[in-house]
Image (tube, coloured by chain):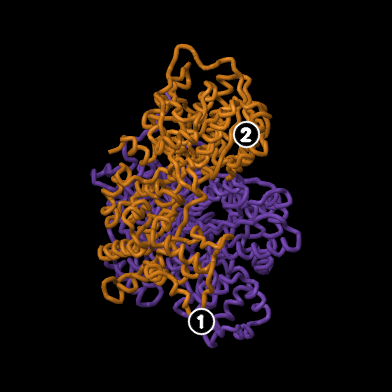
Chain colours: A purple, B orange
Amino acid sequence: MSPSLVTNGDVAAVKTSPVSGRFAAVYSEVQTNRIDHALPLPSVLRNPFKIVDGPPSSAAGNPDEIAKLFPNMFGEPSAMLVPNGVDSVGSDQKLKIGVVLSGGQAPGGHNVISGIFDYLQERAKGSILYGFRGGPAGIMKCKYIELTADYIYPYRNQGGFDMICSGRDKIETPEQFKQAEETAAKLDLDGLVVIGGDDSNTNACLLAEYFRGKNLKTRVIGCPKTIDGDLKCKEVPTSFGFDTACKIYAEMIGNVMIDARSTGKYYHFVRLMGRAASHITLECALQTHPNITIIGEEVAANKLTLKNVTDYMVDVICKRAELGYNYGVILIPEGLIDFIPEVQQLIAELNEILAHDTVDEDGLWKKKLTDQSLKLFDFLPQAIQEQLMLERDPHGNVQVAKIETEKMLIQMVETELEKKKQEGSYNADFKGQSHFFGYEGRCGLPTNFDASYCYALGYGAGALLHSGKTGLISSVGNLCAPVEEWTVGGTALTSMMDVERRHGKFKPVIKKAMVELDGAPFKKFASTREEWALRNCYISPGPIQFAGPSSNAVNHTLLLELGAQA
Amino acid sequence: MSPSLVTNGDVAAVKTSPVSGRFAAVYSEVQTNRIDHALPLPSVLRNPFKIVDGPPSSAAGNPDEIAKLFPNMFGEPSAMLVPNGVDSVGSDQKLKIGVVLSGGQAPGGHNVISGIFDYLQERAKGSILYGFRGGPAGIMKCKYIELTADYIYPYRNQGGFDMICSGRDKIETPEQFKQAEETAAKLDLDGLVVIGGDDSNTNACLLAEYFRGKNLKTRVIGCPKTIDGDLKCKEVPTSFGFDTACKIYAEMIGNVMIDARSTGKYYHFVRLMGRAASHITLECALQTHPNITIIGEEVAANKLTLKNVTDYMVDVICKRAELGYNYGVILIPEGLIDFIPEVQQLIAELNEILAHDTVDEDGLWKKKLTDQSLKLFDFLPQAIQEQLMLERDPHGNVQVAKIETEKMLIQMVETELEKKKQEGSYNADFKGQSHFFGYEGRCGLPTNFDASYCYALGYGAGALLHSGKTGLISSVGNLCAPVEEWTVGGTALTSMMDVERRHGKFKPVIKKAMVELDGAPFKKFASTREEWALRNCYISPGPIQFAGPSSNAVNHTLLLELGAQA
């Protein structure tokens, strides 16, 4: 029998909760199937456990300053869940817990919340989970909903943050901390889970410190979220959402690679989300083998200029032309411009000139630029020059974020190739095609990895709160093993911190984890990129699969960092 | 046991041919699994069959002119394969067949070729299949390769056209027909399969006419290819690639919908590939339920202006703001501008002015525009005005294709909302975010539907050639039933044709199938779009699945057109 290719009419299904039969949402078949996808749990969470503390922790840098900033939290040991004959964690205690999503979306956020909820249901019956709406502002304004089985059900294994939405506010001023305190008191909160990136987790720790300093019972646990992949350390091997986002981008990159090879006439310039670090670009390169990949951290380390980057591209394009390949795929991190010192310098000078001087039509104003900046300005395509001169943010600054780096590079490469054509050293047609893959990756359905990882992070966060822990980030490890062998615990947020001097004051920060040029992922990339440049080793990962042989693959970055891949 | 989330090291696998053990390519796990995906065949192709001719055919329009242009082909009956006790088709005959891919890529092209090849292997042993390289130019230059089991194997069920590549050349002049004849003679071709869109199939029929007129043995069969979905008729219910491309775009649209709902602050303007017809946009709307969808055919039928389109968007955005929704998703067909008469008029006037007059800085040149065009020009955002004035193609014409419609509409909506804000009738923040989904959809891994449909189209084309047919397009029908019940046959290409007058001469054309405003897909869309506009009925289809419950779904357009969906 051949399979039928026909669905039962509409692919959208109305999903109703098995708990109450309540109408949930109109979903696609894939979404519907994902809701009931059974999530595996690490075995330590499926059985009775106790918590074992490690030795006192320190800080990632300047421990003395961190100790001053966090007198109550500094030195907090890491916590590890280990199997125990009987549950040692306060079994009869009912908890009131709040949860908040902070910052940009990452696939899996809903599963963290499901994990917390299920922990409370299964291990602390009668507990209540509140979801603060719209990010940290929801805490300050005490805007929340009680999360019930019915309410959570349709969001299980779904992408997005729409269950309670997110926001970018920060709890910073003494008044804001006071507001948070009032909310905690009003809801009688035993604990709060902050799901966010580096800033939000720093904020979570400040809140933990504040509550402990005031002898309040509310404890705070963080969870590592960001598709950028730049919140990680030894105990927290990856941030959730990175796996899914990279696979969505890699699907699209793989498709344009086949397009490039089939038509034989386009260079696809693909800009990828990730402003601070180039992890996404590196991971996508490892998954797809593009001809050219620019890693911001390497550009910065080698103090490359925009001309250097352009020349590198032009060099590869010319060599490929000699081999008969007038097509290719080039990956560029969103934040590239921020990694190039000369561009930063030019922008600073332009901001200064535009704030204080008039810009004359004859270009006399250009004389105020330093030689290096003038040279760079003249090297830029006219459209970019205009963008730099015209578009301002409300503070009068040039809007770097609005510069479409991939289009700028296409124009610069075009100009240089034209020169080479006239010199006779290049004799082909160059057609650049620009792409930006960003928003479509932040809200996809989480991969099996992200779905399971988030569920364990949330379930573990519940366990940490239940056992009285505060100021920790939920930490799930041994991620190369099957899920049941994953380790679960918490890491002192202060141990991930350093200080930065801002406005004459020390500020605690969790340093963003940048691409390490001596790390395994970059080294693997560097060892093969020359082959990728000239031969066509394209790999097309295809769409994310939720069932079948490729559905449980883990991203290369994580596997390489954990030493699971040669 | 919980599933392991770890792969065996690298997700890339080296796939070797089971025939010769020859190294094939470096593939992702999903690609690798797809190679060996078993394709179902319609039962009529799995058993002995005979060909039954229908009544003589006519033309889609102007049959007298078509009859003059195709004296040998006109009236050709359609052919239908029907089960037969024994194979009536020339069983011992060995064939020499050529195949060519023409025009833009569409997922499934490789499967058409595999289908032809397998037909020859199974039903006409000892036959030879040649692949012409780089499109019709390969026929004219006699650039080909012999397609063997080994050669074809790694391309089975894979996206792209890279097996033999494609091209956009046409066989038009008497010299070019002569070249095609020489190639056919040199390779002793019994038949040629042309896989292409409306133009390529018209060309295929001209070639069939030419060969028959010269009493040559080479027969020509077409296959309906285009992601745009605008090559179809009663006998050819859909063109291949449309299903896959729409599902890839719908995945991305579904993701940005969840992004919109989660952040609550963006209007995503999504431009979708499809220059001539808006089928892709309509299908994606049916799959995802966006707040606003612009269908070019409706804009043209109602003679809407750009201001009308902008006002419609502004109206929905204002109404949504009143409901508290300051976000949304808007779909726009790539070819929108071509559907707006006033824009065409303005561009024609600008071309005229720019060719003959100087454009003065003070704008006196504008006086040469008609009132209506001047009004439109002044209504356009400055960036678009500049684009219209500056960018020319080699013939001095404004490059409409380079206008980023989605960005233009964002600017126009922004301007109108700003006015409303000052009037006090709108009081929210509008943030437009632009997307273009195009190239990433042309080369994806074909869905199960496209994979099976293409395989049947190719297998059927083999059968038609084997039974001596020419001037037909391979036609697979009853597509709402399980694959085994699909019908297989051929439709006279002349029956799909009309004539157009070009340079004073009648030219045969297969008219593009536009979105019918009284057709089922548009009517379904029109009946619910008001609800979609104000309520949030978003559906996120998720990534294409190759296994499991949602893997065999067929696109809405086809189901609705075939009456299989209410």
> Do tag 2 and tag 1 residues touch (Cβ < 8 Å)?
no
Q: Mark 1 lies on which chain?
A: A
Amino acid under label 1?
His
Q: Which of A510 and B526 is in front in this view?
A: B526
- Which image quarter: residue A237? bottom right
For image coordinates 66% across by 65% down, the residue present is: A415
**Could one spot residue B293 in this view of the protein?**
no
**Which of the 4 image quadrants contains residue B33?**
top right
C-alpha span from label 2 to label 1: 69 Å
The circle drawn on residue A503 is 1
Residue A386 on image: x %, y %: 55, 74
Read off the chain for label 2. Answer: B
Using a 10 Å C-alpha cutoff, classify the residue at mark 2 as few (fewer than 14 neighbours), some (14 to 19) or many (20 or more): many
Question: In the rendering, at what x and y percent does residue A168 appear?
Answer: 41, 67
In this picture, is B349 found above or below A239? Answer: below
Provide residue B447's location: percent of width, then percent of height. 46, 38
Q: Name the residue under label 2.
A: B131
Above or below, A155 against A296 in this view is above
Q: Nearer the viewer, residue B374 or B144?
A: B374
